[in-house]
Amino acid sequence: MKFIYKATILFLRLKLNFLSFFSAAKAAEKAFTLFCTPKKRPQPNVPAIFNEATPQEIIFQGFLIKGYQWSKGKSKRMIVLHGFESSAINFDYYIAEGIKAGYEVLAFDAQAHGQSEGETVTIPEYVGLIQAIAAKFGTIHFLIGHSFGGLAIAQYLETVSDQSNVKGVLIAPATETTSAIDGFFNLLQLNKKIRVAFDQLIFNKSGRWPSFYSIRRAIQHVYAPILWIHDKDDKITPLVDVKKVIEDKHPNIEFMITQGLGHRRIYRNKSVQQKVISFF
């Protein structure tokens, strides 16, 4: 598998860098599609709690988005948002605890993930999906997001005018999109012409430069209580980006910094889970 992975990276590197000699814009388009395409990971067994859910569907930007609903009709509503290359079924613990805490609980597979349709997903699309869910089901009072889902929460909350009855939990959130792009370009060793065209492509598509898709920027417009949990050994969403937010000293953000859990094991850790429950 390592050989196949390395061979694939080499092939993409050569292909995109070669294409950039003729058109940096076309190379950037292909790189952007690759950046936004989640790998299909083997799905674990579906936890029993999902058999108790009411299946839900939303048509979003022409794609069928599938999700789940528990405890319909409760006075407060909670949503669980998975990360890139993940799905709702990985967060059964938080769903069960949300139900126990008296919330109506929602969990959806984002576009191109899990049971939902699509091949690619961007952060504006993920934020748009949250907005569509809120429009259909009502005010979301409690949001839990891991990684890409954490970035989506921050970007979503800054669009919510009344945050007085809202709380958010960010678990190993993708703090800076520019860092994710840097990591992508370093992995493929793509040339600077492609990077310039890549950033321009994002601006052309969204009207925003990549630096806009930043939790540090968005969180300046969020006054809802936030619990932020991050690990020192996270190689996917580095703590160095988080430290800048810590230095900003937002009074509404509580940080929990762990060590040895990395990026994916963190949300399954008992201490982390108990911290989130206490924040309910």
Image (cartoon, rainbow, N blue to C red):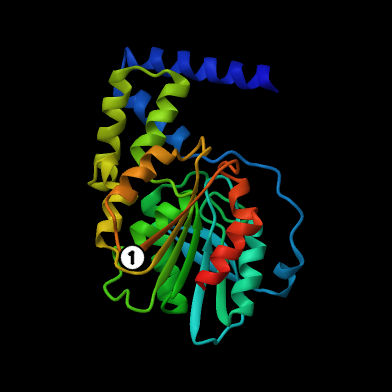
Q: Would you say 170 lies left or right of 179 here? A: right
Element carrying mark 1:
loop
Measured along the vertical axis of the image, is residue 169 above or below residue 194? Answer: below
Q: Residues within 10 Å of mark 1 (few under 14, many from 20)?
A: few
Q: Would you say 76 lies left or right of 260 here? A: left
Question: Looking at the picture, how far across and down is residue 230, in whole percent?
Answer: 49, 48
Question: Looking at the picture, how far across and down is residue 10, in whole percent?
Answer: 53, 15
**What residue is at 60 percent from the left and 44 percent from the top?**
261
Q: Nearer the viewer, residue 144 or 257?
A: 257
Q: What number of labels is visible?
A: 1
Q: Would you say 243 lies left or right of 234 here? A: left
Question: Looking at the picture, how far across and down is residue 50, in whole percent?
Answer: 70, 68
Q: In the rendered image, is residue 214 in sight?
A: no
**What residue is at 32 percent from the left and 49 percent from the top?**
245
Measured along the vertical axis of the image, is residue 233 above or below residue 270? Answer: above
Q: Nearer the viewer, residue 275 or 172?
A: 275
**What residue is at 35 percent from the left and 27 percent from the top?**
28
- Image quadrant for the N terminus? top right
State the image quarter where residue 55 is shown. bottom right
Q: Nearer the viewer, residue 188 or 112?
A: 188
Question: Looking at the picture, how far across and down is residue 214, in whole percent?
Answer: 32, 47
**What residue is at 50 percent from the left and 40 percent from the top?**
232
Q: Nearer the viewer, residue 182 or 273?
A: 273
Q: Amino acid at mark 1?
A: Asn
Mark 1 lies on residue:
252
Measured along the vertical axis of the image, is residue 115 above or below residue 10? Answer: below
